[in-house]
Amino acid sequence: ISYDVSGQKFKYSSENLPVNEYYTSLLGEYQPLNCMMVIESCHEICGYENVRYGIAGTKWPARLEILRKEEPAIILDGAHNEQGVNALVHTIEKLFPNRNIVFLCGVMQDKDYKKMISNVLNSEIYNIKGFVCTKPDNPRALAPENLVDVIKEILDKKEIRGYNISAEIFCKNNPSEALQAAFNYADKIKGMVVVFGSLYMAGIIRNQAKML
């Protein structure tokens, strides 16, 4: 029925349930599908109204979570594989078309981070103005300097659109410093911050965002 930054309204019916309207604050076009599975699985056990209230009240930290609504806005997503990043990109394109984006990213060495980075850089729907690289607090984390090299390599490829090539790239040793840098730059260019790449830095990012 509707989909914006406040959440999603959708209708659902089945052989056992009449058409009803539902609301979830969770972002991502796949979330209503998840809700439908919950409805079918739980309505006989909990009752329709309880399921409905449960869906409406469900929160999912670090999953397309809006940490700050005021400008510059901050979104945190724990996407750490290609599928998750694709969902993130699709959501940004849907809800924030033509916005100036400053990405903040930290990844594990054993993830397919080149495809992840390539996917966020290939969109023509939003404007990538900055990319802040950092290192999550984990022994498996990729050094931010190596992530910078990957981004530069991808931006240099001919298939990347020209407006992305002008993106500013920053390197910060820890997520806290990285968020502050991303926030300051987003404020300067009237953009927003999108954090992704690893759940290992989600806690630090969520706490730091409260102080901005």
Image (cartoon, rainbow, N blue to C red):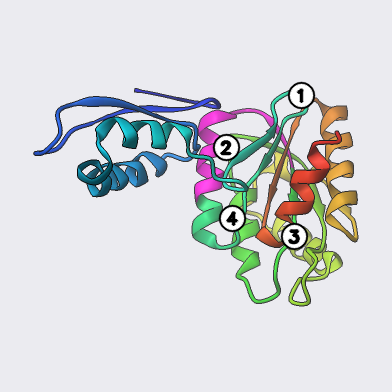
Comparing marks 2 and 4, which lies closer to the viewer?
4
Q: Position of residue 156 (x, y in %)?
A: 74, 57
Q: CA distance from mark 1 to mark 2?
A: 16 Å
Mark carried by residue 106: 3
Residue at figure coordinates x 18%, y 26% from the top left: 19
Lower sequence index among marks 2 and 4: 4
Q: CA distance from mark 1 to mark 4?
A: 23 Å
Using the rendered image of the protein, determine whether residue 198 is visible from the camera's viewpoint: no
Residue at figure coordinates x 58%, y 54% from the top left: 119
Element under disc 1: loop
Lower sequence index among marks 3 and 2: 2
Q: Provide the residue designation for mark 1.
A: 71
Mark carried by residue 122: none
Amino acid at pointer 1: Glu
Q: Provide the residue designation for mark 2.
A: 92
Q: CA distance from mark 2 to mark 4?
A: 13 Å
Comparing marks 3 and 2, which lies closer to the viewer?
3
Above or below 44: residue 125: above
Comparing marks 1 and 2, which lies closer to the viewer?
1
Answer yes or no: do the residues labelled 3 and 2 have beta carbons within 8 Å? no
Residue at figure coordinates x 49%, y 32% from the top left: 25
Quadrant for the C terminus, please: top right
Which class describes the residues within 10 Å of circle 2: few (<14), some (14-19), or many (20+)?
A: many
Q: Position of residue 207 (x, y in %)?
A: 79, 45
Quadrant for the N terminus, please: top left
Q: From the viewer's perspective, is 208 left or right of 4?
A: right
Element under disc 2: helix
